[in-house]
Amino acid sequence: MVTEYLQHPTIDPIIFEVGPLALRWYGLMYLLGLVFAYFWGKKQTQMPHYAAVGWTEKRFSDLLFYAFMGVIVGGRVGYVVFYQFSHFIENPLYLFDMSSGGMSFHGGLLGVITVLAIFSRVTKINFLQVGDFVAPLVPMGLGFGRIGNFINGELWGRVTDVPWAMIFPSAGPDPRHPSQLYQAALEGLMLFVVLAWFSRRPRPAGAVGGLFLIGYGLARFIIENYREPDAHLGLLWFGWSMGQWLSAPMILLGAALMLWAYTRKSQEQQA
């Protein structure tokens, strides 16, 4: 019996174009993530346990702008260093060739962490509390970004015969996992729901950020088993992809951070 697999809907990556200006689906997804972060962040500034440590709408608005810059710069640098370093050595200007595409979540995370550290120093808000505030704002942006990947027909999954397998024209005739949608669901919507629920009450400094690191790391590590590895890298040591090697330390760091946060809280209560 021949199975009729789903066909990826061919969608023009450009929504509309006016002269030299073009609105692309991927850019729109970034914008939706930024808008969502803005409105959810404003909601958090009204929560007593966030306001108590010094969060205001003004401070949040300032942070959002610089954090977005951190995502863009860190994401690009991370992609070049983690995934295209040999190409960068051959042509250092490749780092600035944004038209060729290529962004790394792990690089973007490092960029944001750098911004948060500077923001913490300037505002005198504890660095871990800054991270706790920002963590719930991130997942939906990741989810929208993965939807953008799906629309563009890129970063597809491995070959499979599951009933919902999809044929991506740019990936050849074989049916594949629509892993972009898996990531949008787990790294995006589900992780946001978990963090929104967890952060609605006061938690020890570092606990929310730690949960984000664990949640994202686990989701990414699992889904990498269904996502096609980067062609020029393939699978690395232990059969892990680069995404898994970058996610494993996140899980360990998140677990250590949560353990430290609750241990410290227990010690303070006993003192």
Image: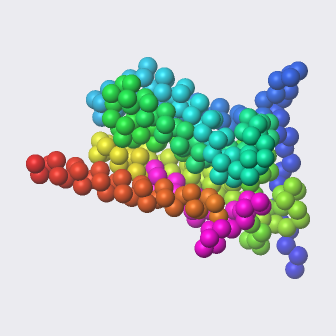
Left or right? Give the position of 86 relative to 215: right
Total labels: the figure holds 0
Q: Position of residue 39 (x, y in %)?
A: 51, 29
For the N terminus, the quadrant is: bottom right
Which one is in front, 105 or 185?
A: 105
Q: Position of residue 21 (x, y in %)?
A: 82, 23
Left or right? Give the position of 18 relative to 30: right
Rendered image quadrant of residue 103: top right
Q: Position of residue 44 (x, y in %)?
A: 41, 32
Which one is in front, 74 or 266?
A: 74
Which one is in front, 81 or 138?
A: 81
Q: Position of residue 270 (x, y in %)?
A: 11, 51
The answer to whether residue 110 is seen in the rendering is yes
Magenta stretch containing residue 128, yes or no? no
Left or right? Give the position of 143 relative to 270: right
Depicted 2 relative to depicted 126: above or below: below
Depicted 243 relative to depicted 106: above or below: below
The answer to whether residue 25 is seen in the rendering is no
Which one is in front, 146 or 64?
A: 64
Rendered image quadrant of residue 12: top right
Depicted 127 relative to depicted 268: above or below: above
Say how the picture is coloured: rainbow
Numbered range of the magenta stretch = 212-240
Q: Which residue is outermost to the bottom?
A: 1
Rendered image quadrant of residue 27: top right
Residue at the spot x=46%, y=42% of the render? 135
Residue at the spot x=88%, y=21% of the render? 19
Residue at the spot x=45%, y=26% of the render? 60
Magenta stretch containing residue 217, yes or no? yes
